[in-house]
């Protein structure tokens, strides 16, 4: 392989990665804005500013595209969690709980919710989504324990961290139709006070 061949391939690979990235971001936008039914490959391709053929070159089916978009969403959301600055001292628990509550109420969560709803009525899609969601749940639980400085090896502590995530998910659902941020903030404060007593060391 000559140097010129390598130079020719590199821009092509970069363009391919850029196109794929645009498709994933467009898929997330369409899911959050338009819902599952309207988020077809054609619609996502148009949102990304590329042809349907180019989109199908990267993702032959809508399921392929949506599953890749879910993976991308998870990476973005996990990066946000792990990179968020959490203050020390007495406010740590409240800051972490609020961060987790926000994790389950942002546009990325709403986009993922569209896929979960579709998967509930589609056995094939559900069989693909469930393993991904289990992987995502484990990742979020691990990061939550780290942010709380909690001993996740303790069974009760583990359960309380999971309860925090379940509560966050439920509040996220309540936020889908109306802005529930005020109530979510009050609950975060109250729950964090209990969590500080129970799970942190």
Image (spheres, helix red, strand yellow):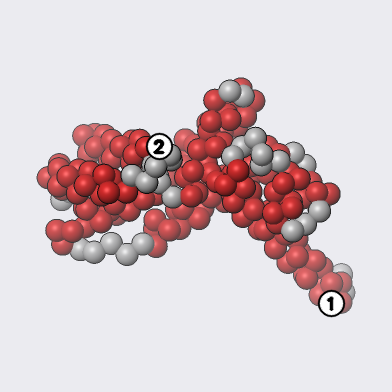
> Where does the image place residue 155, in percent across and percent down from the top left?
24, 34
Give me the C-alpha separation between circle 1 and circle 2. 54 Å
SS class, disc 1: helix
Residue 58 seen anywhere in this rendered image of the structure = no
Q: Earlier in the sequence, mark 1 or mark 2?
A: 1
x 37%, y 37%: residue: 174
Q: Which residue sits furthest bottom?
A: 3
x 43%, y 39%: residue: 177
Left or right of 117 in this view: 92 = left
Observer-side mark, 1 or 2, equals: 2
Nearer-the-camera pick, 75 or 169:
169
x 36%, y 62%: residue: 84
Nearer-the-camera pick, 49 or 64:
49
Nearer-the-camera pick, 132 or 104:
104
Left or right of 37 in this view: 164 = left
> Where does the image place residue 32, in percent across and percent down from the top left?
55, 46
Figure check: 14 above or below 145? below
Q: Residues within 10 Å of mark 2 (few under 14, many from 20)?
A: some
x 45%, y 53%: residue: 78
SS class, disc 2: helix
> Where does the image place residue 120, in percent across and percent down from the top left?
54, 25
The residue carrying mark 1 is 3
Residue 161 seen anywhere in this rendered image of the structure = yes
Q: Which residue sits furthest front?
A: 178
Where residue 173 is drawn, which disc sits there? 2
Snapshot quadrant of residue 67: top right
**What is the quadrant of the N terminus in the image?**
bottom right
């Amino acid at each position: 392989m000559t140097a010129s061949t390598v130079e020719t391939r590199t821009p092509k690979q970069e363009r391919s990665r850029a196109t794929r990235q645009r498709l994933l971001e467009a898929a997330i936008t369409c899911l959050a804005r338009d819902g599952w039914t309207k988020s077809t490959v054609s619609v996502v391709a148009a949102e990304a500013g590329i042809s349907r053929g180019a989109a199908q070159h990267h993702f032959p089916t809508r399921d392929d595209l949506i599953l890749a978009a879910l993976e991308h969403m998870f990476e973005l959301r996990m990066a946000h969690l792990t990179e968020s600055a959490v203050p020390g001292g007495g406010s740590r628990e409240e800051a972490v709980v609020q961060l987790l509550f926000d994790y389950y109420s942002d546009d990325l969560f709403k986009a993922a919710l569209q896929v979960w709803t579709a998967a509930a009525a589609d056995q094939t899609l559900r069989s693909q989504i469930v393993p991904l969601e289990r992987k995502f749940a484990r990742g979020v639980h691990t990061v939550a324990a780290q942010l709380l400085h909690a001993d996740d090896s303790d069974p009760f502590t583990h359960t309380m961290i999971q309860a925090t995530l379940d509560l966050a998910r439920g509040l996220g659902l309540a936020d889908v139709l109306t802005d529930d941020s005020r109530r979510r903030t009050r609950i975060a404060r109250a729950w964090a006070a209990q969590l500080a007593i129970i799970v942190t060391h």
